[in-house]
Every structure is written in C-alpha cells, then in structure tokens.
Image (cartoon, grey):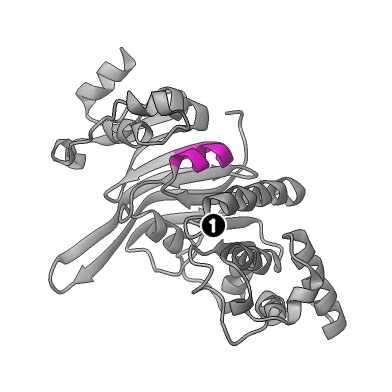
Amino acid sequence: MKQQEKILEVKDLKQHFHSGKNGVIKAVDGISFDIYRGETFGLVGESGCGKSTTGRTIIRLYNATSGEVIFNGTNVHGGKSKKDLKAFNRQMQMIFQDPYASLNPRMTVKDIIAEGMDIHGLAKSDKEKTERVHELLETVGLNKQHASRYPHEFSGGQRQRIGIARALAVDPEFIIADEPISALDVSIQAQVVNLLKELQQERGLTYLFIAHDLSMVKYISDRIAVMYAGRIVELAESDELYNNPLHSYTKSLLSAIPVPDPDFERNRKRVAFDPDSYRPEDSELREVSPGHWVLCTSEEYKQYQA
C-alpha cells in the first residue's frame, strides 16, 4: 500500500474485565494496528473474540486497561477536557449492531437523527435542523415523511439506515461499524453495505468495519485483520488474505464460507482449527511479506518466509 496518512493508531491495546467467578477476562490482549485515512479496515472473528470490545474501547465507551489509541495524532485515552471530548465525539461515530435496541423507541426519527446536531450546536434554527434531517434521510435511502415516525414503524434495514443517518449528522471523519448487517436479512445486507461504500466515496469517510462474515468483509474492506481470543492472528490486504491465508485459524474461517455451487459444496474440504495448538505466549505478530502480518513463533516465521 502506498504511503498514506494514518488516522488511527492502536498500540498494544488491552481491555481486561474483572469477573468474580473467572478472575480476569482478557477480552482484548495486546493488539496493534493502523488505519489510513479513507480506507475500510475490516476486523473479523467469531463471537467472543474481542472485536466489538476493540471498537468500543477505541471510541471510549470503555476505558482501556492499557495501551494507546492515537486518533489524528492525539491519545484518545489520555486526560482530556470536556471540550476535547466533545470534539472527539463529533469526529468519531459508531453504527451499532442491533438496529432495534440502538434507537430510542420514545423518540421520533427526527429527534434521533438531530440529537447529535443539538449537542454540538450544528443547526442555527429548527427550520435548518429539519432541512438537515430531511436531507440525511434522503441520503440513506429514506424520505422526509419518515421524520415524524417512531422506530417501531420501520423494518430492520430501515432502522439501520436511520442509525447511519444519525452517525452522519455530525459530519464525522471516522465511523466504527460494529456488525452493522448481522441482524439483517441477507437480501438487505448488500443494500446497507453498498450504501456505506457510496457514503465513503461521497464524504471521504474512514471505516472500521467489524463483522464475523468474511465474505461480506472482503467485499467492503481494503485490509482485514483476523482476531482470535483477544489477539490479532493475521493482517493483510483483502485479496492477499483470501488468496494466501497463512494462520490456521484464518484458513479455517475461509474454508467455512459457503459458495452458491452445489458441486463445490458437496466436495468442500473444511480446514479444522485446533484451539489447543494456539499458544499466543510463544508468538508475536510478525511481517512475513510486505503488509502481511501473522501471529507466529520464530520457527514458523522462518517457514513462512521460506
């Protein structure tokens, strides 16, 4: 990848939770990656691997246990004034996984979308605010008549569009999309992903796209990091990861992607991943070829290079 401006740097980020029964749960256990301005960075893995916790820690919904999140040159988790936090909250927004739970059922669509505008004082009058809400609704494929309705009057796909409009209302630079399509019908998923791609081109947005569906992540992402048990096990450009997976967990995920071909499916060879073979304490993330990183031991590193 040509030299680009880094908008986000994650350095040795850890997010540990204390549990009475289990002691410490290491949801995120020392991960590092960069995201460049204007790209879509995919973060994939099975449920419970720590990918959503990573997104929530980056946007400060959780305070990091340790490590750094550098956004536009500033440490997100450093001591910040209310003014700095407000500016950060405008620059970075989140689209949530559940379009049913993430919208307040007692608020109209207009009030939901305009909430960020009110907080940041982005509309000089109610007329300007209404016009802006109508414009955002049309941007995401809805219409201005929807502004006076309530969330229960919409389908899942329409609600997610409202969630996208809410995120766009404050003109952010960076959006964390936390499994934004996993609760939607397959027929609607492609529409929402295509909308996100269009908005990115029109507005110069940068995305962290979190998901467990590798086929959809490949479609939208420039680079992909694969996460397992709180660590990144492989990171590469999208095509490189699909065509040349190296870590056994990545191979396992890719071998499970269904293909609309009955003959292929009958003869599919699944790659099994053995969790007992995973020993992160003996491994570190190493660059085995330009831009292709794998969590491996020094011996495995030599094999990959050979």
Q: Amino acid at mark 1?
A: Ile
**Foreground pick, 26 / 45:** 45
- Quadrant (top left, top right, bottom left, bottom right) of the N terminus: top right
Q: Residue furthest top?
A: 306
| Residue 167 position by quadrant | bottom right
In reply to whether residue 215 is colored magenta, the answer given is: yes
**Foreground pick, 62 / 45:** 45
- Quadrant (top left, top right, bottom left, bottom right) of the C terminus: top left
Q: Position of residue 298 (x, y in %)?
A: 22, 25
Q: Position of residue 249 (x, y in %)?
A: 29, 36
Decide: is 50 above or below 144: above
In the rendered view, does 154 fall on the left or right side of 278? right
Q: Which residues are magenta?
A: 214-224
In reply to whether residue 113 is colored magenta, the answer given is: no
Decide: is 243 above or below 161: above
Decide: is 27 above or below 125: above
Q: Position of residue 205 (x, y in %)?
A: 67, 51
Residue 183 visible in rendering: yes
SS majority, magenta: helix
Q: How many marks?
A: 1
Q: Which residue is drawn at the image coordinates 56% and 72% (left, top)? A: 85
In the rendered view, does 52 fall on the left or right side of 280? right
Residue 122 visible in rendering: no
| Residue 176 position by quadrant | bottom right
Mark 1 is surrounded, within 10 Å at the Cα level, by few (under 14), some (14 to 19) or many (20 or more) other residues, namely: many
Which residue is under mark 1? 176
Q: Residue furthest bottom?
A: 106
**Foreground pick, 196 / 50:** 196
In the rendered view, does 112 fall on the left or right side of 63? right
**Foreground pick, 19 / 177:** 177
Q: Secondary structure at mark 1?
A: strand
